[in-house]
Structures are given as C-alpha cells and as structure tokens.
C-alpha cells in the first residue's frame, strides 16, 4: 500500500489516549400535573430547559399537561401538544438507553419520535384509550473533544447542530403525542455503529433535506447506537484533516463498527496524487486498517448514485471509478461491502425519471418558508428517499451476515430496491426547522 498521499500516517491517530469519560447520570421523569410516581422527577408543562436545571422543554415549544387521575401515578398524567415539541436533557458523551412511555388513559394518542438532528427513532405509533406503551432506544450523544488538547474541527454550520451540543434532545411529533414518562440510563456496553461520510450520510438538521444515516436508528433494537460523524461536503481527506477519524477512534470499543461512504466530494480533489485509484483508495485502506487496530469492524459503502438519467431512461454513472475503487479496496481488505451505488441505481430506475424526483429535494417554489425559487437537487435526498436508502443499508447488513443483523428490529421487512415503497404510504411529520440552502457538496 502506498502512503505518500495520506494526511496522517498509520498509528498517529492512536498515539493520543482516549479521553476519560465523564460519569454518566441516570434520569427518571414523570410528566404532567398529577402526583409524581415514587422515584421519578416530576416535569410540569412550565419546565423550560435551562443549563441550571439540565432538563426541560426546549426551543420555546408550548406544552399542555393532563391529569386523568387513578392509582398509577406514572401513567395517569401526561403532556401533549398539537405542535411538535422538544425535551432536552444535559448529558455527557456516551450511549444511553432511552425509554419513553406513551399514551393517554382516557383517549387515543399518536406519536412520531425523532432525536437530536432529526434521527428517526419511531414511526407513527398509535394507542387506544387506556393503552400505554413503552419503547426503548439506544442513543449516542457525542462531543467535539478528542483529548485534553484536541477537538474536532467543525464547519460553521455545525456549530449549532443538535448533534454537537451538550444535551440529548427528543422531538415528539404526530397528530396527538402523549408523553407520560421518560427514563435515561447509561449504556456503556452497547455496540456503536460509527458513520463516516458526506451529505448523503449525515444527520441533516433542516427540512426537506435528509440522509440515510439519520434513518438507520429506526431499524435497530436497543443495544446498538448510531454515532453519525458524517458531514456535508467532506471527502476522505477532509474527514481526516478535521480530526473526525481521530475522534471516532478515540471512543471506539472492540466490536464497534465503522461504515465508510465517500466519493462524491473526492471527485473534486485534483492534485497530482488524487483520484479513485490513488489517494482515495489509499485513504480507504487507511480507514480500514486503523479501525481494525482498535478492534472495530470496518464496512465499506459505495457512493449513492446521483439521479442522472440518460436518454434511454437508465441511470448514467456520474461517479467515475470511485465505486469500482471502493469495491476493490473491500475485496483486497476482505471487509464487508454494501454496494449502495448499485442499489440506488436500481431504486431510481424502478421509480422512473419523474417519480424519482420525489425521493430527492425537488420542490416547487414556496413549498417551505423563504423558498422563493424551486429546489431541484439530484444528489441530496428528502426524508422518503433517505428512508428507502437506509433500507438498502439494512439489506446490506443482512447480506454480509454482520453480527449487527441480530439487532435489526423485528418489524423490519425485507426490501428490494427494484420494488420501492409507495410514496403515498410514507408518513413523515415535518420538523419545525427548514432551510433552502443546499448542503455542501454535490
């Protein structure tokens, strides 16, 4: 393997010790105006988040409390809102098991749950009167800190992302979300799936942009957390130079995973040693080898196809040799390969020239606030497209017989990208924040 193109030499990323993890606290919250359950902290509708309290409703959302009475103090009251509402808890970096109790003792409820920067946890889940349910998720909270002297170099747009702040934020959507209780406990033994990639992978904060990484948590059982370190506009080289791989390796445990998807932005590197078969391949080897040095399990993911239809109605490859180079590195390193390039090509062709626009950010003017011009982006997905591609990733997990497959949720059906889900059956309540600016990269 040639190394002259690498920004960091093998071993250098591991030279600094991982930071000592802060003591991870536990919380038990009982929501609503009724008598709080024993051992639980009562949360009234007026409990706005402050750094002093370290928990509360966030971003100015308005909440109503309801008390139905009854013997079960935990389930007899709840909070609700006709609009999306946020609840945040200040937490140090780590993985946490988060259990929500949802429902109304005397009425129906319907909840759709996201975390942090719009990570999908729970699709629309309805309850009948007197039916309360609990659901548990393992969620990653990350920090910029690598060690006592180094931090991840964030882009300006990342400085206000919910993924990078000092708290865990839950977003409750749906026609009538009813939150009765919330428990948070540390999950230090949970497996972490780290994601390294670009705008096709990152957790996008704002509607209507989305990527497959933020949809993946929906398909995983408790015991696995997704730590998405991807960012728009990044290539393998800039992921390294911004110290993101160093960050991932500083907190990686043996048995954790690193999914690696790059290519779109690597195409733009035009130096003497750049290109699919030079720097790109060498850096992929480097990512794989450094992951293995930490006892992690690397998975190479080929770049998602762009929506580039030819005159014959078939997708034309716009990524040059980069998908082929990723396949070759995976073969040489004998690591799992998820061929998203092939699967997304099949997906777009199955949808067709016009219908495939509905999987990407194609919207007429004035669909979103401040959007005075049409949006027509053939690289970046909307939530529907990102969800379909996450299903492709799930199929790749199963096809490669990764140990991760045992953590796939039981309600995860088999998926064939040649037979995409009907858009009419797709439900995604928009989050309050939207943006008309295209993410970095193309």
Image (cartoon, rainbow, N blue to C red):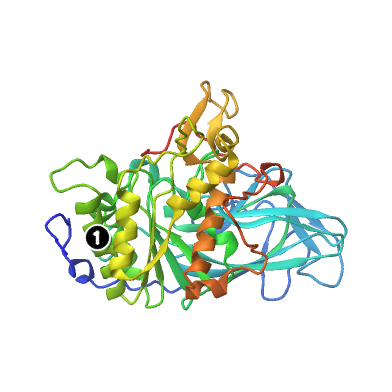
User: Which residue is found at the position 54% from the left and 62% from the top?
Assistant: 395
In the rendered image, residue 332, in percent from the top left (x then y), is placed at 28, 67
327 on left or right of 308:
left
**Circle 1 is placed at which residue position?**
150
Query: To which quarter of the image does residue 106 belong?
Result: bottom right
User: Which residue is found at the position 35% from the left and 51% from the top?
Assistant: 323
Q: Looking at the image, which is closer to me, 29 or 190?
A: 190
Q: Secondary structure at mark 1?
A: loop
In the rendered image, residue 230, in percent from the top left (x then y), is placed at 39, 53
- Counting the numbered discs, the total is 1
Q: Can residue 238 be spotted in the picture?
A: yes
111 on left or right of 417:
right
Q: Residues within 10 Å of mark 1 (few under 14, many from 20)?
A: few
Q: Can residue 202 be spotted in the picture?
A: no
User: Which residue is found at the position 74% from the left and 43% from the top?
Assistant: 82
User: Which residue is found at the position 71% from the left and 48% from the top?
Assistant: 174
In the rendered image, residue 20, in percent from the top left (x then y), is placed at 33, 73
143 on left or right of 270:
right
The quadrant of the rendering that contains the C terminus is top left
The quadrant of the rendering that contains the N terminus is bottom left
Q: Looking at the image, which is closer to me, 358 or 152?
A: 358
194 on left or right of 425:
left
In the rendered image, residue 32, in percent from the top left (x then y), is placed at 74, 59
Residue at the limit of the structure toward the front, as seen here: 312
Query: To which quarter of the image does residue 257 belong?
Result: bottom left
Residue at the limit of the structure toward the top, as seen here: 372
């Amino acid at each position: 393997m040639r190394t002259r193109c690498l920004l960091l030499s093998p071993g250098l990323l591991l030279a600094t010790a991982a930071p000592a993890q802060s003591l991870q606290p536990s919380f038990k919250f009982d929501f609503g105006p009724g008598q709080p359950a024993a051992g639980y902290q009562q949360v009234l509708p007026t409990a706005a988040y402050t750094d002093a309290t370290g928990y509360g409703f966030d971003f100015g959302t308005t909440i109503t409390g309801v008390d139905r009475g009854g013997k079960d103090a935990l389930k007899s009251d709840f909070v609700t809102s006709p609009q999306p509402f946020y609840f945040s808890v200040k937490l140090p970096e780590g993985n946490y098991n988060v259990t929500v109790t949802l429902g109304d003792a005397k009425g129906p409820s319907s909840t759709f749950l996201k975390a942090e920067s719009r990570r999908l946890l729970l699709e629309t889940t309805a309850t009948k009167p007197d039916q309360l349910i609990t659901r548990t998720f393992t969620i990653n909270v990350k920090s910029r800190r690598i060690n006592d002297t180094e931090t991840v170099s964030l882009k300006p747009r990342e400085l206000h992302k919910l993924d990078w702040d000092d708290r865990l934020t839950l977003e409750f959507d749906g026609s009538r979300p009813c939150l009765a209780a919330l428990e948070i406990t540390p999950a230090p033994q949970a497996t972490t799936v780290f994601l390294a990639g670009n705008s096709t992978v990152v957790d996008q904060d704002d509607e209507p942009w989305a990527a497959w990484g933020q949809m993946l948590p929906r398909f995983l059982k408790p015991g696995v957390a997704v730590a998405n370190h991807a960012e728009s506009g990044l290539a393998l080289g800039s992921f390294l130079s911004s110290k993101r791989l160093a960050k991932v390796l500083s907190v990686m445990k043996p048995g954790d995973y690193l999914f690696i998807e790059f290519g779109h932005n690597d195409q733009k590197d035009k130096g003497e040693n750049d290109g699919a078969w030079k720097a790109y391949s060498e850096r992929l080897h480097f990512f794989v080898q450094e992951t293995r040095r930490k006892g992690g399990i690397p998975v190479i993911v080929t770049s998602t196809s762009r929506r580039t239809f030819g005159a014959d109605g078939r997708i034309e490859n716009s990524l040059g040799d980069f998908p082929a180079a990723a396949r070759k590195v995976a073969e040489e390193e004998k690591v799992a390969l998820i061929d998203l390039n092939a699967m997304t090509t099949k997906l777009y062709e199955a949808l067709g020239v016009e219908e495939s626009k509905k999987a990407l950010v194609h919207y007429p003017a004035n669909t979103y606030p401040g959007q005075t011009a049409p949006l027509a982006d053939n690289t970046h997905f909307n939530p529907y497209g990102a969800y379909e591609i996450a299903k492709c990733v799930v199929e790749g997990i199963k096809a490669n017989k990764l140990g991760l497959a045992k953590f796939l949720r039981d309600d995860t059906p088999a998926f064939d990208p040649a037979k995409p889900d009907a858009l009419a059956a797709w439900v995604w309540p928009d989050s309050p924040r939207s943006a008309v600016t295209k993410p970095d990269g193309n």
